[in-house]
Image (cartoon, rainbow, N blue to C red):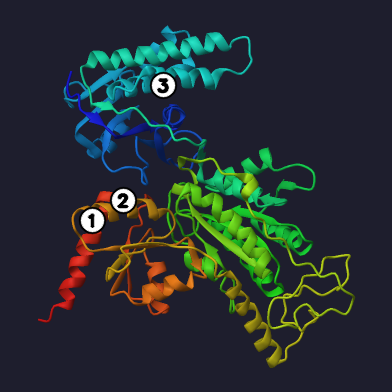
Amino acid sequence: MEGCLKSRDFVVRFAGEGGQGVVTSAEALARAAAQVGYHVYTFATFPSQILGGPTWTQVRISTNPVQSQGDSLDILVAFNRYAYDNHISELRPDGVVIYNSEEFDLGGESGRSFGMAVDQIAKEVNNARAANMVVIGGVAQLVDMPVKYLEDFVVKRFTRGRDEDAQIIESNIKALRAGAEVARKSGFQLGELEPPTPPKYDQLLIRGNEALALGATAAGLNFYVGYPISPATTILVWMENNLPGKGRFVHQVSSEIEAITAILGAGYAGARSMTATAGPGFSLMSEGLGLAWMAEIPLVVIDVQRGGPATGLPTKTEQSDLLSALHPAHGDVKLPVIAPGTVEECFEASIYALNWAERYQGPVIVLSEMALAERSQNIRKPDLGAVKSERRKVYTGSNGYQRYEARELSEMPLPGGPGAYVANGSEHDGMGDTTHLPERHIRGTERRFGKLNLLNDGHYEAEHASSPIVVLPWGGSKGPAREAFNLLREQGVDIGWLYTMFLHPMPPKLLEILRKKELVIVPELNYQGQFSSILRGDGIRAESIRQYSGLPFKANELAVRLKARIKQHQERKVPA
């Protein structure tokens, strides 16, 4: 048996075809590890067809909090030859390959590998559907994770009050043990994963999309409509399963245009309304968002970014919708944008978005992305009762009210109540009636932009902020950037950390700090360097580290690129 060192962290990738159990194996391992107190972080990528196509899911399990999917692999589980050929390059030199020997045979190609007849073993324990348990039993054995952890998970997962529960539990436990035995006989051992230290608070293993939906519900969302589109569909599914009730409405509409106009009407009528989409659907919402800005109607749109443009990469990740989120409509429009960077922040972002929409009476955009939306991570269980929900300032006076007359925010009448007005997409006077007078357009434009000053309560993170060079990630690039920052600090590199999920308006104090820096480095997943270009427009010396492969950053690779960029900047400062 090789190796016996204790380990705090390991990364396993399950790779194969869609429908081979790639995703279910990873989910089962993640849930089992989280249940006993390990920190878990998953990442999945798959093709856009319903079944088949190259699919892989990565699980990182650690005794400490983790912020990225991990770089190199400790274990590669290859369900077919294609998966092995395409992922073996990312295996650590001392890593181990488990391959499905019913699909292919490596022979002597890889010295640190062994085959496992997963389907045959599952049939031998009288449960053909337990093949994924065979696999994770083998994975657990390689890191000396006690099989009891997995057995406890099986008992919890399959205890559903059915007559056949006992038989299902028994066969799945047998499958786990059989897989562990195959791995034990292989003679490979990656080291012992240290026992977890469960936190003293309740946790949830939850995806980013689910956290967005949960946060919105906690903040009093009562009107949600959506149209299915990858990778935002699971928000609609969650809402359909959890939101309906007295005074709350959920509906699947026929298009993104119907979705934006429905929440626009609901917002006008007094509802806290929301929809979610991805890039192509967001493009179709452009005119509706312009109307919401012009008529000053509260609503929230979640854009779960994916590779673009056009159909692009429906199931890959990217951060390329920032410019369109800020300026989705023609004319002078700049919408509030919140871009969460972690699963926990997804919960918080929905709350802020709904409150901001009510506070400034207009549309708010939440920018997520595929890698964050589909990521599972265990977080502290939110206290839903502690969520503060800002309510609309409703006009209760007499008729003749001019809602748009004031230069600042004014109370909003509700249909059927006093103060009737026209919610008009044309430039308008105080009552909402159409006007083309120059002074009215000036007054209306200044009013709409002036209300953004009500949204300056966003918070930010700062560490070693006195450094002349700082890294400023946004959205889901936060985690890899944070781990890269930590690596560089350990190496003695003078670099600071700044971060906020509030991209517009940014916290004023953060803007002040950024304007004083020699260099602000922005890691972002797009070709154009969209966030750094926005920052330069605000007088900040910003440069991007860009990636547009459809995959998130890796922390170690990002650290190397950050270090090189710092060196390049320092060389530019030295006179020739």
Label 1, label 3: how far apart the Cα atoms are: 35 Å
For the point 50% across and 64% down, the residue is 502
**Label 3 amino acid?**
Tyr
Q: Quadrant of residue 360?
A: bottom right
Evaluate whether residue 229 shows in this view: no
Q: Which mark is residue 483?
A: 2
**Label 1 amino acid?**
Leu
Question: How many C-alpha atoms fall within 10 Å of the one at disc 1: few (<14), some, or many (≥20)?
Answer: some
Q: Is residue 220 above or below residue 172?
A: below
Residue picked out by circle 3: 149
Q: In the shown orientation, is residue 428 left or right of residue 279?
A: right
Q: Is residue 114 above or below residue 438?
A: above
The percent position of residue 503, horizontal first and vertical second, equals 48, 66
Q: Indicate the secondary structure of the residue bearing disc 1.
A: helix
Residue picked out by circle 1: 488
Q: Quadrant of the N terminus?
A: top left
**Label 2 amino acid?**
Glu
For the point 44% across and 17% down, the residue is 151
Q: Indicate the secondary structure of the residue bearing disc 2.
A: helix
